[in-house]
Structure formats: C-alpha cells, structure tokens
Image: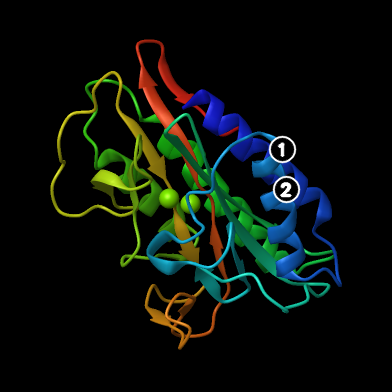
Amino acid sequence: MRKAGKVVVEIKERTREAVRPGITTLELDKIAREVIEKRGAKSNFLNYHGFPATICTSPNSMIVHGIPGSYRLEEGDVISIDCGAIVEGYHGDSAYTMGVGEISKQAQHLIEVTEQSLVAAIGVMVEGNRLHEIGRVVQKIVEAEGMSVVREYVGHGIGTAMHESPSVPNYWPGNSGPKLQIGNVLAVEPMVNLGGPETLTLEDGWSVVTKDGSLSAHFEHTIAILENGPEVLTQ
Ligand code: MG
Ligand code: MG
C-alpha cells in the first residue's frame, strides 16, 4: 500500500503543478493517466461503476466525483482533485483542493479548515481509539468555523479494494464505533461546505454539488494504523 501511495502522491504533485487558469480538467486527467502508465500501476477510478476517467475533478460548488472534461479552470476557482492507483493489487486514494490563481479569503479559509480537519483526524488514529472519534474531531473543527460537513459521502476502509468496510463518517454518527486496531488502513476524506451540508447529484449521474450552491472543499489521505501511530501513505 506504500507503493500505491507513492504513485498517488506523484499524481497529486503532477496535477497540482499543472493547475492554472485555462487548463481543462480533461488535460489534468491525461497527466494522471500518464503517471499511472509510467509507474506500471492501474487506475482504480477508471471504469469504477462505469466512471469514465482516472481522477475526479470537482470545481467550486462541486463536492466530489466530477468527471474531467471540457471545463476550463478560471482564475478564482477552487478545484478539488481526487486521485487513486493500484499497485500489486493494493489501492491508494487521496484528494486535495487548491485555488486557481488568486482566490477569495473565504475560499482560502474553507480550504485551510478542511485540510486542518483531516490533519486533526489523523492525530486521533491511534490503536485503541474508537473509529468515530475521527468524525467527531472533523465535525467539531468544521462547525466551529460556521461551515458544514457533508453526510451522504464518507471515508472508508481500503486495501485490496478501494472501498472496504468500515464506513468512516466525517461527523459523529451517534455511537463511538469499533476500536481502531494495528493494521487497519482507512481513507479519511472530509468534504466541507461553506453553506449547508445538503447535496445534489447532477444529470451525469456522478457530479455531486452543494444544494445551496456554496463552495465546497475535499481532502483525503490513505492512512495505516501502526504500532508507532498513524502512517499517512499518500503524502
Ligand atoms: Mg478519493
Ligand atoms: Mg476515498
């Protein structure tokens, strides 16, 4: 899973370098495809339930699962890019959000809070802690800033499949859940909206947007729980 994580890191770095006003999301997808080919990896996104691309590109009010295409990034956009790869049968999954050129202070704050919530969540991923401590920590940080946590989409276990049990909500689900154990690997992925938490799926059947049109950000890491603490496999 460390090997898969390294390929995912390379996809993130290469796409991050390419993000600028004028580039299309399909061009970003091509960069991801090239990295996967060059490293002899496989895509876990391509053809996943029919998903037609190698990464997900979700600008502005789009939360997750955007399909790369003819959309051209514009100065001031907020773009979330979700990347994955399979190496020797094991999966990596990671996402980041960044501004395109100059962005508003509010947008920058949204990005920072979302990333901070993931960092804080990783901090509680220690053997013996309860699974839903992750969501409790994310929700607390996000709501303290007047933002909201998406409920309909959650993190997940990951290993020889991209999505394994358990589900990893980014909010307190009302119970503490099982204890975290050495060897557990989880993809933790807070999705945070400036407005309300409600979502809509567009007619393409994939793109998930905020119902109120507010901006949204998404960060994700694949994290292993080890004896020395959490190891982030995708940074
Ligand atoms: Mg992902
Ligand atoms: Mg994921």
Q: Nearer the viewer, residue 116 or 219?
A: 219
Q: In the rendered image, is residue 146 in sight? A: no
The quarter in which the C terminus is drawn is top right
Task: Tell me where residue 189 appears, x and y as whole percent.
Answer: 44, 50
- Image-quadrant location for residue 129: top left
Q: Nearer the viewer, residue 48 or 2?
A: 48
User: Would residue 230 appear left or right of 114 to someone viewing this image?
Assistant: left
Task: Tell me where residue 88 appears, x and y as whole percent.
Answer: 47, 29
Q: Marks 2 and 1, Cα distance to the nearest angstrom?
A: 6 Å
Q: Which residue matches tag 1?
A: 38
Q: Nearer the viewer, residue 199 or 110?
A: 199
- CB of mark 2 within 8 Å of CB of mark 1? yes
Task: Tell me where residue 50 appears, x and y as whole percent.
Answer: 43, 68
Label 2: element kind: helix
Q: Residue at x 49, y 76 (%)?
A: 207
| Residue sitting farthest toward the top | 228
- Badge 1 crowding class, 10 Å Cα cut-off, few under 14, some 14 to 19, many 20 or more, is few
Q: Which residue matches tag 2?
A: 34
Question: Callout 2, which amino acid?
Answer: Glu
Q: Residue at x 34, y 42 (%)?
A: 161
Tell me if the residue at label 1 has its CB under 8 Å from ligand 1. Answer: no
Q: Residue at x 35, y 62 (%)?
A: 153
Task: Tell me where residue 102 appears, x and y as whole percent.
Answer: 84, 65
| Residue sitting farthest toward the bottom | 203
- Badge 2 crowding class, 10 Å Cα cut-off, few under 14, some 14 to 19, many 20 or more, is some
Q: Residue at x 81, y 75 (%)?
A: 74
223 is higher (above) or lower (below) than 206: above
Q: In the rendered image, is residue 180 in sight? A: yes
